[in-house]
């Protein structure tokens, strides 16, 4: 099958490559671009580990073809640190609140939480839980992931983070 | 999992898309949000030789008011429906149902046109469109035609769409001001299809039901309109005996498959409960 030339912006840099139409975006990111922060979990659109941000949308990159991303602006977990290399509020939240154990779901969780906080800067706990309902974690029981996102929201909003009493 | 090989086409107009579909024949499939088709392709349960991506057609996007109808372009995503003030104000049941479809990521890509055109009995929008009395616009090489949602579904994945046709928009009559509505969906987890779901749109006057329409999701090979159940509640105050009668009338037309969501008897039973809950909640929000 003839290959197609694609160009897109990933984490601020223009990238290009030759892909078959059937190449999934997640494979293009991981194999062509050698950016392996975006994970492949279930490959069936359920788990959310492959979530990236495309033109302001959280998308499961295993369910979109690379050719469909032509001309788009993509952020992956590699693009989440602050410009000076320090951890962003979300990354810091996951670290401080122990929002990961094995870490496999973390890139997808962070990319989804990134868009969630862009759309709703002060989500309730329920809104966070529904907001990450397309991301599956098999270690944490979600408790600390929710806290990590609350931590990040507080930091972004410049208020003190207080853990809710359990 | 990698799909089989295909050629990718990205037409910029409906006319071009329709021409591609008729030129390429049965080996070509239109691609909307892709969140049903791409997983099927990865499992090689679908192996189209050509994909015609509809994302390049601007005319298929958007929500507008036409007289008393809301007209929604087929490529409008569930996320865009949720973000629309027009939908929230004129047709809150559409907002409520869209929020129960899949998960946030899927809703950014999944489209209303794909949801209603695929003919998957598990999809939520078809029964809702039947309940609201929506009409679908189908465009093919021979021109455009309108088909009522109630006449569109013929069997699981079989619809009134002819080869070479694309569903381009939906026209939905705006329910009367003060109407009551509810979409009750029982599912095992976020992202699952309904074990059973019921949509209710009704109007009330003096505590009695004046008009009522009831749709059922995933309890038959097609979405259903529960006409007898709706008729049973007209003129009543939805007392316990009436609710029981309506649920029984709805259960009588259900023929769900036994699957991981439960045996037939269970799915019919909870289907009746969804009808009861939807009727009660719809009545409680009616003005």
Image (cartoon, coloured by chain):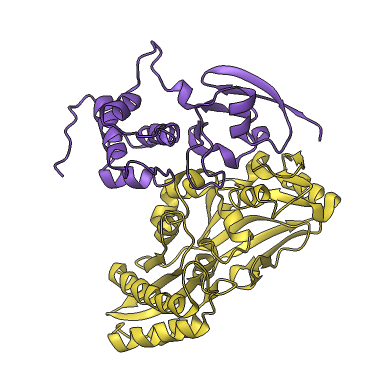
Residue at 59 percent of width and 60 percent of height: B116
Judged from this view, the residue extending furthest toward the right is B23
Which chain is drawn using purple? Answer: A
Comparing B186 with B30, the one in front is B186
Residue at 51 percent of width and 38 percent of height: A59
Residue B42 x %, y %: 65, 47
Residue B190 x %, y %: 41, 54
Which chain is drawn using yellow? Answer: B
Assign the N terminus of chain A to one quadrant of the image.
top right
Assign the C terminus of chain A to one quadrant of the image.
top left
Vertical arrangement, residue A60 with respect to residue B97, above or below: above
Q: Quadrant of residue A20?
A: top right
Residue B41 x %, y %: 68, 49
Vertical arrangement, residue A6 with respect to residue B177, above or below: above
Residue at 68 percent of width and 33 percent of height: A67
Judged from this view, the residue extending furthest toward the top is A84
Report the side of B11 relative to B244 (left or right).
right
Judged from this view, the residue extending furthest toward the left is A165
Q: Quadrant of residue A26?
A: top right
């Amino acid at each position: 099958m003839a290959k197609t030339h694609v160009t897109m912006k990933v984490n601020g840099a223009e990238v290009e490559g030759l892909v078959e139409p059937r190449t999934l975006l997640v494979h293009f990111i991981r194999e062509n671009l050698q950016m392996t922060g975006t994970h492949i979990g279930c490959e069936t659109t359920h788990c959310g580990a492959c979530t990236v941000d495309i033109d302001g949308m959280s998308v499961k990159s295993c369910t979109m073809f690379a050719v469909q991303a032509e001309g788009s602006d993509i952020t992956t977990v590699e693009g989440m640190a602050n410009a000076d290399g320090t951890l962003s509020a979300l990354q810091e939240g996951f670290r401080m609140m122990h929002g990961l154990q094995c870490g496999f779901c973390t890139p997808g969780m962070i990319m989804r939480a990134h868009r969630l906080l862009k759309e709703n800067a002060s989500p309730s706990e329920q809104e966070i839980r529904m907001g990450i309902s397309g991301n599956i974690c098999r270690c944490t029981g979600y408790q600390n992931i929710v806290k990590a996102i609350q931590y990040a929201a507080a930091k972004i909003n410049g208020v003190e983070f207080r853990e809710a009493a359990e | 999992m990698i799909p089989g090989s295909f050629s990718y086409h990205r037409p910029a107009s409906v006319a071009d898309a329709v021409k591609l579909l008729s030129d390429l024949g049965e080996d070509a499939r239109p691609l909307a949000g892709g969140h049903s088709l791409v997983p099927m392709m990865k499992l090689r349960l679908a192996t189209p030789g050509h994909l015609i991506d509809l994302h390049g057609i601007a005319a298929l996007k958007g929500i507008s008011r036409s007289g008393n109808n809301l007209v929604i372009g087929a490529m409008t995503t569930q996320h865009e429906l949720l973000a629309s003030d027009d939908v929230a104000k004129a047709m809150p049941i559409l907002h409520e149902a869209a929020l129960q479809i899949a998960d946030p990521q899927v809703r950014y890509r999944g489209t209303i046109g794909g949801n209603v055109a695929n003919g998957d009995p598990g999809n939520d929008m078809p029964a809702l469109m039947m309940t609201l009395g929506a009409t679908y616009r189908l465009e093919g090489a021979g021109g455009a035609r309108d088909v009522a949602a109630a006449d569109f579904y013929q069997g699981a994945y079989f619809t009134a769409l002819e080869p070479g046709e694309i569903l381009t928009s939906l026209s939905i009559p705006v329910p009367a001001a003060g109407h009551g509505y509810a979409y009750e969906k029982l599912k095992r987890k976020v992202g699952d299809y309904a074990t059973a779901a019921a949509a209710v749109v009704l109007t009330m006057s003096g505590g009695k039901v004046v008009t009522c329409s009831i749709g059922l999701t995933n309890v038959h090979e097609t979405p259903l309109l529960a006409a007898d159940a709706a008729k049973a509640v007209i003129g009543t105050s939805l007392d316990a005996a009436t609710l029981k009668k309506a649920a029984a009338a709805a259960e009588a037309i259900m023929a769900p498959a036994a699957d991981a969501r439960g045996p037939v008897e269970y799915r019919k039973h909870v289907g009746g409960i969804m009808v009861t809950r939807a009727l009660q909640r719809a009545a409680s929000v009616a003005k």
